[in-house]
Each structure stands twice: as structure tokens, then as C-alpha cells.
Amino acid sequence: MLHIFTDLLAAIASTVWDVIPIVIVIFGFQRLVLRKPVANRKRLIIGFVLVLLGLGFFLEGLQAALFPLGRLMALQLTDPAFIAGDDIGRVLQWWDYQWVYLFAFAIGFATTIAEPSLLAVAIKANQVSAGSIGIWGLRIAVAVGVAIGIALGVYRIITGTPLYWYIISGYVFVLIQTMFAPRMIIALAYDSGGVTTSTVTVPLVAALGLGLASTVPGRNPLLDGFGLIAFASLFPIMSVLAYAQLSEWRGKHG
Amino acid sequence: MESLKAIWAALFESLRDLLPIILVIGFFQFAVLQQPIPNLGEIVIGIVFVVIGLTLFVQGLNMSLFPIGESMAYSFVSKGSLFWLLCFAFALGFGTTIAEPALIAVASEAAIIAANGDMIENSEQSLASYAQGLRITVALSVGVAIMIGVFRIVKGWPIQYLIVIGYSGVVVMTVFAPPEIIGIAYDSGGVTTSTITVPLVTALGVGLASSIKGRNPMVDGFGLIAFASLTPMIFVMGYGMLV
């Protein structure tokens, strides 16, 4: 039990280490180029400390509680013995993996809701749009996109179809949607592709991809295990554009 | 008393954000895999940590990362030097990416794939130098991305034109890049944007768009992250072709 607390200190120390380059860039430019003292310096420093402590607690908590269980679960669910059920030894088809698809969808949705960078962008978008973009509306739209993306990415690994087919058709679809979407949402929608995949989603999703690629016959974990993150960054763009189109349509039709 | 209430409310909100993960893992553990939860005590402590962490992070965000990003945007605009603004944008993108732990992990994995595909020699030294080169490539690409993104905000160009060019770049590079690198390249777009970079860069963009005349923070302010997830794909495939 004690090791959680020592690990916590290590997690905080490593967050501090990650932040050093950012602090150097900010204060370097502030001092040498802008040559202006920072306003509210005390509040700023307290804020930075809170961010560092917060991320340290957050990461260590995930490490201690959710990641080991989630990873183990991904491995167990992709185990051929579990998927084949009683009839061990039969050839598995892509529809035999229904629990894996459900897990991929659910974990994609759930981890996105807990993603701190998405929360940050949603708070900012809510402020900037004077409330017309809801924090929860955006988060749920993005989470649905990630969920669909990861479920489809899992299907790709199971069937072994080339990654770039999906990504390139996804691009074409996004471009068509862009032509019809309300102008103010476009940049935010493109951004939401990048923010979904950070601290919470990547470790769990990577475990799922590697687990599948090493148990599905004919897949190479090194080649096929990648690509889920790409799906998780592409599909939220579509779902956020769709959400905006839907809200606009609803606004027009009563 | 009031502030105590506010703290409880914030903690409760964080717990609510975490609830879906707890439900999903609980459901699959009990209903699908039909196994008990191991180390329940540790898991409860872990969940408490995550809730505290998320609450502190959001508090700190509004006190530090948001205001500093915005105030630097205002200062650069009032200084009026596009050159220094672009230098800052590049340094911010490069500096935040080079130390990113997720990127370090992906880069060393990519080196193993390259060695297995006989693209590089399978020795410790060549693996390390390949991974190092990849990290620098991705960091450069994010620096360039933030720089282009900031330039776009200053000029007020519609984002979709630049995205179309970027997407075309990805498609063209996919045709020529070695197949082993494609999966990593596509994923590298997602790993570059960390939890500290995202709020900072978002505040910078929104701050620029609200202090430059004629720009709308909603239409022009967002989009920096989008570039930071797009250019690494192109740069990494380019790296795979050159090395």
C-alpha cells in the first residue's frame, strides 16, 4: 500500500520534468523578448503548482487503479480461448469478437469523458462561444466519435484490411462535411481530433490494439497493433461536425 | 464555508467524469469475464487520487495555463512583431514535444519495427539514433505546425484550405512511404499533444484571435492543435523515406 505514495512522488517529479521545457520557453520569451513582468505572478505560480500536483495525482491514480485492470481486461477479452467459448479450435470469424467491439466502444467513450485536455478545450470553447457550445455537448460528441473510431479500428485489426483505406476515406468524408458545417465549428472540430488522445485513452487503447494484433492469426503486433490512435483522432472530427450540423438543423426546424 | 462547498462540488464533478470508466471496467469484470476485482484497496485509493488530481488540474488551469497563454498572446500583439511571435510559436511546439513521454515510447517502438523491416541495422546504437532522429523530426513538425497555425490566425485564412493541403500531403506521402512506417506515422499525430500543451496552445490561439482586429475567437482562434496532429504524420513518413 505504501508504494502508492512513493509512486505518487515519482509521478509528480516526472510531471515537473515534462513541464521544464515549457516553463523555459514561456519565461525566456517573457524576459528576453516581451520584457514585461508577468501580471498576477503569485496566482500564476500557485496555478502551475496545482496543475503539476493535479497531473501527478491523476497519472498515479490511473497507474494504480485503472490501467493494470484495463490492460488485463484487454488481454483477456482478446484471448482466443475466451472468444471461441466452448468450441475451442474452430476458426474465428470477425463477428465472433462482439465483446471486443463492445469493450472498444465503451472504453473509448469512457476514457474520452475523463480526458483532462478535452475538458480544458471544452471549457475554453464554452467561454468563447458565450455558452452556445455546451461543455457536456462537446465532450459527449467527441466521446461518441472516439468510441466509433476505436470500434472500427478494432474491426480493421481483426479483418486485416489496410489502415490507409479507412483514413483516406475518412479524410474525404471530413472534407465533404466541412463544406456543409456551420463555419464557427470547423476549427474546433479539427482540434477535437488531436485533444482526445492523451493521458487516459492512449495507454488503454494501445493495450487493446497490441493484444488483438498478437492473438488474431496472421496479424503482426508490430505492424497491425498501431493505427487505433489514428482512428481515435479522425472520428471525433466527424462526430463534432455532425453534432454542429444537427444543432443547426434543430435550431431551424423548431 | 462557501469555499468548502465549492471544493465538494468540484470533487463531485471530477468523480462524475470518472464514473463511465468505473462502470465500463466493472461491467466487463463482473458480467463478461466474471472475475472478482483484485487489490480492491489499491483501486479505491487510485480512484481517490484520480478525482483529486482532476480537480486540482482544472483549478490550476484557470489560474495559470489559460491566463498565461492569453496574456502572452496580448503582449505579442501589442509588441507588433510577427517575427518574434512566430519564433515563440515554434519554440513552444518544439519544446513541449521533445520531452513528451508518449513520444519517447512510440519512437523506441518505431526503431524496433524499422530494424525488423531491415530498414536499419539491428544494433543498439542504430536503434537509439533512429529513435532520437524520429523524436527530433516529430518535435520539429509540431514546432512548424504551431508556427503555421499562428500565422493563419494572424492572416485570418480559413482553416479548411490548409487542412486540405495537409490531408493531400498525408495521402501523397502514404503512397511513397515504406509500409512499415505508415501505422506509426498515423499514430504519431495523436501522441504529440499533451495535457499541458493543449490548454496553453488553445489559450494562445484564442488570445491572438481576440486581440487582433477583425478576427473572431471562435472561427479563427481554434485549430492550432489540428495542425499539431497533422504535420507529424507527413514528417514521420518523410523520415521513413529518408532513413
Image (cartoon, coloured by chain):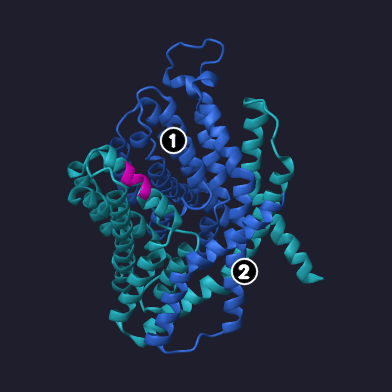
Chain colours: A blue, B cyan
Residue B151: image location, x then y, percent? 29, 71
Q: Foreground: A128 or B40?
A: B40
In the picture, which quadrant includes the N terminus of chain B? bottom right
Local secondary structure at mark 2: helix
Looking at the image, the residue that sits furthest to the right is: B1
Residue B4 visible? The answer is yes
Q: Does the magenta stretch include residue A72?
A: no
Looking at the picture, does residue B72 appear above or below residue B239?
below
Tally the numbered discs. 2
Q: Residues within 10 Å of mark 2 (few under 14, many from 20)?
A: many
Residue at 40% across / 56% down in the picture? B192
Q: In this view, does B24 lie above or below B78?
A: above
Q: Which of A240 and A86 is in front in this view?
A: A86
Against B218, is A73 above or below? above
Between A227 and A110, the one lying in front of the other is: A227
> Which residue corresponds to the image point at 57% horizontal and 83% vertical from the top-left?
A41
Residue type, label 2: Leu
**Picture quadrant of residue B149:** bottom left
Query: Which chain is home to disc 2?
Result: A
Element carrying mark 1: helix
Distance from the alpha carbon under mark 1 to that under mark 2: 35 Å
Pointer 1 or 2: first along the chain: 2
Instruction: Give coordinates of residue B2: x percent, y percent.
Output: 79, 70
Q: Label 2 belongs to which residue?
A: A50
Say which amino acid is labelled 1: Leu
Residue depicted at 40% across the width and 75% down the height: B208
- Chain bearing mark 1: A
Label number found at residue A210: 1
Image: magenta residue range? B108-112
Q: What is the magenta segment's predominant secondary structure?
A: helix
Task: Answer whether labels 1 and 2 touch (C-beta < 8 Å).
Answer: no
Picture coordinates of residue A87 (x, y %)? 52, 10
